[in-house]
Amino acid sequence: MKRILITGAAGFLGSHLCDRFIKEGYFVIGMDNFITGAISNIEHLKEHSNFKLIEHDVTEFVKIEGELDYILHFASPASPIDYLKIPIQTLKVGSLGTHNLLGLAKAKEARILIASTSEVYGDPLVHPQTEDYYGNVNTIGPRGVYDEAKRFQESITMAYHRFHGLETRIVRIFNTYGPRMRLNDGRVIPAFMGQALRGEDLTIFGDGLQTRSFCYVDDQVEGIYRLLLSEYTYPVNIGNAEEITIRDFAEEIIRLTNTKQKIIFKALPTDDPLQRQPDITLAKKLLNWEPKVGRKEGMKKTFDYFRGLSKEQLYKSEHKDFANHIKK
């Protein structure tokens, strides 16, 4: 049985990856420090014979007993609310955390896939974004702690590959959505759906003409799975190339939720990208991958999940453990 370590296992994407690799017959070691992850995301795996949970901060030395075949490094704050409130932790998990896990992969002779992001492109001057575009990032802006952590993560990963011959993979993840997202994490899909469920007006930042491209979580996980098992070392975009303006998307949410809310406009946050659309030509050619779940189907599944949350979950402003970890 192959053994895989998944960091950020209690997060949105991490928990779905745990499910997928258990389904594929792997023994999964999940690791999380629960700064932004939720134990409820992996509660269903607690008694599974092929799953082990370790509570640990990957910015500290990581030790795993026994053999290890693969590592997926998905530990990181991943939404604006998170990395603006905990900027130092965000930088540390992308730098120190990645360094620790690359060292572990070297010691175990394991293949490691690191989760990068479309944010390495910043506010792009090239559209759609291809893997050979170097990006337009403000290194000292408020979003720079996340963008630069991920850019450094890519650099040190390639250094380990070139210098040590480590088997490495890099996925650049574009906007992904689905069940288990935190309702109040600041990203547009949970923000709009949460506002609709609470009877609040939908808030658009800027004029709403900025664009996003949304990939359903099952498609994202499939792309990551195929990339891990491929022989390609350089970054690969995984996302949905279907682009929509935020204003049109807000109208879609109002129709989906059958609510009567208005749309209100507020100032655009600093360095918020105006365009975000992946070029997935490489993923199609290399991995024979492309999204299968349409936005209408995926949004309905996501809304059904949010609609099933308790009233307490619907109205709380942030993860219940978040404040305790900020103090560290």
Image (cartoon, rainbow, N blue to C red):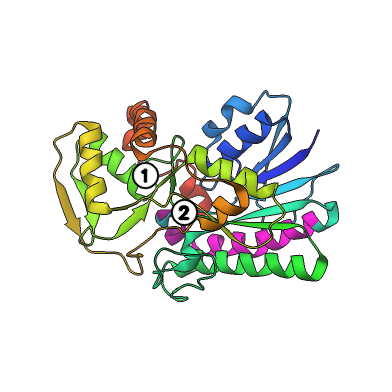
| Depth order, front residue of 235/17 | 235
In the picture shown, does residue 209 fall above or below 196? below
57, above or below 152, in the image: above
If the image is split into quadrants, where does the C terminus sit? bottom right
Q: Nearer the viewer, residue 281 or 118?
A: 281
First in sequence: mark 2 vs mark 1: 2
Q: Quadrant of residue 61?
A: bottom right
Residue matched to label 1: 184
Point out residue 42 in the picture as x, y percentages from the top left corner.
58, 32
Residue linked to disc 2: 174
Asked if residue 99 is among those painted magenta in the image, a careful observer would answer: yes
- Figure quadrant of the N terminus: top right
Q: 46 or 327: nearer the eye? A: 46
**Which region of the structure is painted magenta?**
81-105
Q: Which mark is residue 328?
A: none
Relative to the observer, which residue lies in front, 323 or 226?
226
Residue 21's x, y, as percent? 66, 35
Residue occupying image coordinates x 58% and y 53%: 285
**Mark 2 packing: few (<14 Cα in 10 Å), some, or many (20+)?**
many
